[in-house]
Structures are given as structure tokens and as C-alpha cells.
């Protein structure tokens, strides 16, 4: 299976296309929809790059996979499904996330609590067949309850569970996040062979380093600044919680959650024909 990476500079997000040349079948992981918060306008620049790549190679999209409900960008899953087909899938624990956030946004009229807005809800160790390749789903919660990693051949796509070794891991201070659970998920990943390639969901490079998005599991185990194999569970929890303390809310958190909980839809139009993003005034302070 071949891998094509797309880096969205506005959100520091990686989108991946996995494809098998022999069968022409493909999978898209974590696609990005552009959104300007000041104007409320969306753009499809990043998604159209994926569409162009797929169509130039005459690929058939089988799956559009989400590693989790993103809080820092809007998903282009709905848009890509409309133009390319494929089934949108996310971890089955999405129901926990829906049951927390849908009452907060008061959006039950257009955000089903059972996750039926997604085509498939994925379970730990479930497998997806793409051509002659098998993708294994691994439940890796901690950043959020729904986080999944996707393991195929010699590569694993970890979303926000791990970042590049010099960046560390995702935060754990969102509702449903838990530093101890994230540590346990990382330890599950560390049981895989050392030469497995780890593809991350974001990169926030230290000054002077270019953007990178792949490392080996050995490099993660040896040198991840927060989660190397030499760091104990207690130490990890302490370091992670110290980093998360007073961490600013992601700029696109409120728009992203509402859209991503609907698998990329902006919800039902109101009487005037417009769709809306809700901004709960002082709402986050009550969580």
C-alpha cells in the first residue's frame, strides 16, 4: 500500500491517502475543510487537492476514516464522500463524545446521539479490507475517548495520540481526555515492532526544524520527550497535566466540534435557508 501525505499549513494537520495500485482502491484519513472564523466562509482547497490526486490516479475510495473528533479543524469527510464516494467511519466510542457535547450545543435535532451520521462505527481490532490490504483498527483513547489508530503492513496512523518525538503527545484536558489512559494507549502501541513507521496527525515543529510527520516506533520509544519508554506512568501524567494547565482553547474548537460531530455536515438550515455555527456565550466556563 502506498501513502500520500497532505499538510494543511493553516491547521498543521496531516491528511493521508493510502492506496493500492494493483486494485486501485484507496482510503483517506483525517481530511480537512478550510474555515475562516471571521467571515464564516468555508473553502475546499485542501480537500480538492485530495480529489485531484485520487482522480488523476483513477482510484476508488473505499473508506474515509477519522482518527477522532477533531477540535482544531473541520473535517471534509462529507464533501469528499459527495465527490468521491466511500464510507465515513469513526470509533464506536463516538457515542460518549456525542452524549457530552450534543446537550452542550443543544443540537440534538440534527446531531444523532447514536452516531448514525457516520456510515460505520469502528471497534478495537476490527479490520477493513482495501484491495489486498488489511487495515486493523486499534482503540487508543486518552486525548479523547474515541481516538483510534489505523495499522496496515509496516505503518500506523496514530492521529493525535503521538506527535513527532521532539513534540511529544496530544493534550488530555478536553472533556473525556485522561493522561493515564493516554499513557496506557501509547504503551499498547509500543508493543508493535520497532521498525513500524508512525504517521502523526499534526506537526508543530520546534524553531529551526522543517515539518515532518513520520518516525519509527523505535524513535518514539527512545526519544519522545513526554512518552519515551524510560518515562513512568506517574511521570507522564505529571508532565502532561503540567503542560495542559492553562493551555489555550483551540481557535476552531466550537465550530469544529459541531461540524465534526455530524461527520462534516453543517446541520439543518434554518427558516431563512442559512446554516449556523453556535457559539455558547460563557458556555465553556461552565463545563
Image (tube, rainbow, N blue to C red):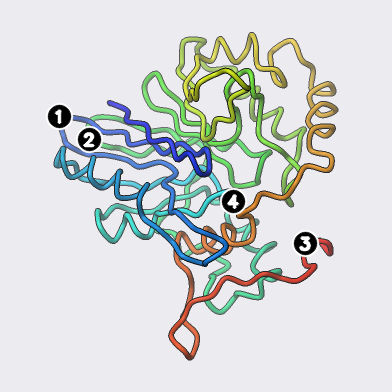
Residue 154: x and y, percent?
Answer: 39, 18
Going from N to C along the chain, the mark reached first, 2 or 4, is 4
* Neighbours of disc 4 within 10 Å: few (<14), some (14-19), many (20+): many
Q: Residue at x 79, y 17 (%)?
A: 232
Q: CA distance from mark 3 to mark 1?
A: 49 Å
Going from N to C along the chain, the mark reached first, 2 or 3, is 2
Q: CA distance from mark 4 to mark 3?
A: 22 Å
Q: Secondary structure at mark 4?
A: loop
Q: CA distance from mark 2 to mark 4?
A: 27 Å
Q: Nearer the viewer, mark 3 or mark 1?
A: 3
Mark drawn on residue 131:
2
Contact (CB < 8 A) between labels 1 and 2? yes
Mark drawn on residue 93:
4
Q: CA distance from mark 1 to mark 2?
A: 8 Å
Q: Nearer the viewer, mark 2 or mark 3?
A: 3
Q: Secondary structure at mark 3?
A: helix
Q: Nearer the viewer, mark 1 or mark 4?
A: 1
Contact (CB < 8 A) between labels 1 and 4? no
Q: CA distance from mark 1 to mark 4?
A: 34 Å
State the residue position of label 1: 22
Which residue is more in the foreground, 205 or 136?
A: 205
Q: Is residue 162 above or below residue 91?
A: above
Going from N to C along the chain, the mark reached first, 3 or 1, is 1
Residue 143: x and y, percent?
Answer: 67, 40
Amino acid at each position: 500500500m502506498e501513502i500520500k501525505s497532505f499538510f494543511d499549513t493553516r491547521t498543521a494537520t496531516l491528511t493521508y491517502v493510502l492506496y493500492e495500485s494493483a486494485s486501485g482502491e484507496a482510503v483517506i484519513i483525517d481530511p480537512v475543510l478550510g474555515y475562516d472564523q471571521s467571515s464564516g466562509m468555508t473553502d475546499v482547497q485542501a480537500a480538492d487537492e485530495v480529489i485531484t490526486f485520487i482522480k488523476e490516479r483513477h482510484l476508488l475510495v473505499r473508506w474515509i476514516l477519522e482518527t477522532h473528533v477533531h477540535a482544531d479543524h473541520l473535517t471534509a469527510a462529507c464533501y469528499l464522500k459527495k465527490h468521491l464516494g466511500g464510507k465515513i467511519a469513526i470509533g464506536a466510542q463516538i457515542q460518549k463524545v456525542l452524549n457530552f457535547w450534543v446537550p452542550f450545543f443543544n443540537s440534538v435535532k440534527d446531531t444523532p446521539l447514536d452516531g448514525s451520521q457516520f456510515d460505520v462505527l469502528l471497534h478495537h481490532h476490527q479490520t477493513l479490507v482495501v484491495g489486498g490490504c488489511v487495515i486493523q483498527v486499534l482503540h487508543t483513547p486518552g486525548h479523547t475517548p474515541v481516538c483510534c489508530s489505523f495499522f496496515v503492513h509496516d505503518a500506523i496512523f496514530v492521529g493525535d495520540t503521538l506527535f513527532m518525538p521532539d513534540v511529544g503527545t496530544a493534550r488530555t484536558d478536553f472533556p473525556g481526555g485522561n493522561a493515564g489512559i493516554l499513557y496506557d494507549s501509547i504503551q499498547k502501541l509500543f508493543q508493535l515492532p520497532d521498525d513500524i513507521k508512525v504517521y502523526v496527525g499534526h506537526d508543530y515543529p520546534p524553531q529551526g526544524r522543517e515539518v515532518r510527520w513520520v518516525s519509527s516506533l523505535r524513535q518514539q520509544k527512545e526519544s519522545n520527550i513526554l512518552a519515551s519508554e524510560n518515562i513512568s506512568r506517574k511521570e507522564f501524567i505529571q508532565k502532561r497535566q503540567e503542560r495542559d494547565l492553562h493551555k489555550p482553547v483551540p481557535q476552531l474548537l466550537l465550530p469544529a466540534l459541531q461540524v465534526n460531530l455530524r461527520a462534516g455536515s453543517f446541520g439543518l438550515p434554518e427558516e431563512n435557508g442559512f446554516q449556523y455555527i453556535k457559539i455558547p456565550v460563557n458556555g465553556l466556563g461552565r463545563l
